[in-house]
Image (spheres, rainbow, N blue to C red):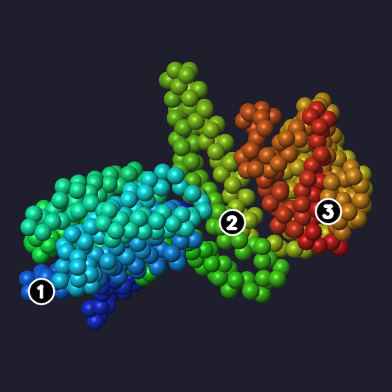
Amino acid sequence: MITPASAAVPTEAVPLSCGGEQPPQESVAVSSRQERHCVLVALLAAVAGLVYVSRCNYLLFHSLVEVYHVAVCWGIFFVAWSARPLFRNSYLCILGVASLFVGLLYLLHMLAYKGMGVFPDADANLPTQLWIAARLLQALAFLTASLSLFHPRREINALAPASIWGLLTLLFVGLIFTGYFPDCFIEGQGLTPFKKLAEISAVFLLLLSAPLAWLRRDSLDEHVFRLLTASLLLTAAAGLMFILYIDVYGIFNMLGHLFNIASTYCVFRAFIRTGITEPQRLLFLKLHRRQEELERIRSGLEREVRERTAHLHKKNWELEASNQRLDEFAYSVSHDLREPLRGIYNFAHFLAEDCREKIPQDSREMLDTIMRLAMRLDTQILAVLKYSRIGRLELDLRPVCLDRLLDEVLDSLADMIARNNAHIERPAPMPRILCHIEHVREVFCNLISNGLIYNDKHEKIITIGWHPPNAASEEIPLSGNATPVFFVSDNGIGIPEKHFQKIFGIFRRLHGQDKYGGGTGVGLTIAKQVIERHGGRIALRSEPGSGTTFYFTLSAGEQ
């Protein structure tokens, strides 16, 4: 039942703070905004500082930028390599492994830069060649990673990309230092056509990677996808700057490095920060989702454990949180749906009574159909309510005389037995057992009713009996146990063997809704649930046209 808003949320449930303190949610939001503002201010200050340093000492500026690139690339590799078993796909694995070799080429590029003096005989061509090699490796890594999203693999092999990018790095370094790599920069002339073509090719590969990754964006965390896309675009922008510069100390070279800093920062956020300080958003995304589900289940289990610690050794299987939540949900929905359903039936009934003679025949039939369907749905809701209640209530185990219980069941079904011209057989007295009397009464009532309903014989026969404990027989399912085996047999229409398990599913019927007197399709589901809650089992033998025998045990106890 839906309660009014005023009743559901008491006014004292949200107290006002006298000291002007903010609610926890607002405090967290303010803290997050302050953190972002601080990061933005720090980045702007760092960029301004780098611009100032570039004006004073460009070599120092370049060294700081490249050290940052190398540190981030190698940090990405270490994080990716450590977390590779937890990746959902190969995208991040390929980028992480390739970052090791890209960082190595960045380091050689920094050491070979004009003015560093590490390679005294080298001019500006050597660092430009190393830069182009790093750019091509990076662009190939992004493209390969994007293509890998179209062929996901359950097992991710990090050695394959490591071997490929390692060989490519050795190839580039060997060609560069042996003089076989094309010139990229000539003093006094600037960039060579090859350098510009290579830079354009790298930009093209990067721009091609973005739409490919977008097509498979569902394979990546949304936050990480945005960061990596931004990194791709910024890297492409940096490439355009590096096409335009003439002097290695010029403004376009500086702008290209600044774009590279922004691009590397996006990768830093996607890999390092998200992968270490918030690993559940990237490297442990799948694990995080499982942990969230397990945390919800754990909270439910802890609550149940506190309430039922004294009975845990008897009822630990009742603490399955998912089943209990399903039972509570079915109970709540069943209870809330009946009120509007009764309104539909009543209004249709009133309309049929008041206007039956004033409306056409087809309209009267529609009203009758509405009332019939409403009654059927109400019956099914009641069945679900009963099913949910049986699953939630604790068993009240008491000694019960089954003969007396069967007398009560047959009395309640007397009219149905008489209408069906049925004969009830009870070959031997039933034993006394320890059980929940109401639930076991429901079991016998459902099995006997089914034997009467699904029966096309003129003289219907229902046999109710039991086999003593340890009465081993191939003809008796569930026999050989230390508990009695009860049975309810009929000479009805029978059940094909392929449907033996299907009939115990909720709302499962083997016939049309209007055949054999209708029914809710919940009776056998409830019987199975009651028997299993008593620690027993249920089985059946049946042949179409010859009848059905249901066998079951109740292992909660015996007297």
Disc 2 target residue: 323
The 10 Å Cα crowd at callout 2, few under 14, some 14 to 19, many 20 or more, is few
Disc 1 target residue: 57
Between circles 3 and 1, the one closer to the viewer is 1
Q: Decide if residue 483 is on the left or right side of residue 343.
A: right
In front: 185, or 257? 185
Q: Amino acid at mark 3?
A: Leu
Q: Residue at 65%, 55% (x, y): give it.
A: 390
Q: CA distance from mark 2 to mark 1?
A: 69 Å
Residue 259 higher or lower than 14, as above or below: above
- Residue 113, how many percent across, how many down? 19, 67
Q: Decide if residue 215 is on the left or right side of residue 242.
A: right
Disc 3 target residue: 402
Marks 2,1: beta carbons within 8 A = no
Q: What quarter of the picture does the C terminus occupy?
A: bottom right
Task: Classify mark 1: helix, strand or loop.
Answer: loop
Q: Residue at 19%, 51% (x, y): give it.
A: 195
Picture quadrant where residue 539 is located: top right
**Between discs 3 and 1, the one toward the N terminus:** 1
Residue 536 higher or lower than 56, as above or below: above
Q: CA distance from mark 3 to mark 1?
A: 99 Å
Between circles 2 and 1, the one closer to the viewer is 1
Asked if one can make out residue 460 in the rendered structure from this viewpoint, the answer is: no
Picture quadrant where residue 120 is located: bottom left
Q: CA distance from mark 3 to mark 2?
A: 30 Å
- Residue 131, how many percent across, how many down? 23, 59
Between circles 3 and 2, the one closer to the viewer is 2
Residue 136 higher or lower than 546, as above or below: below
Furthest residue toward bottom: 19
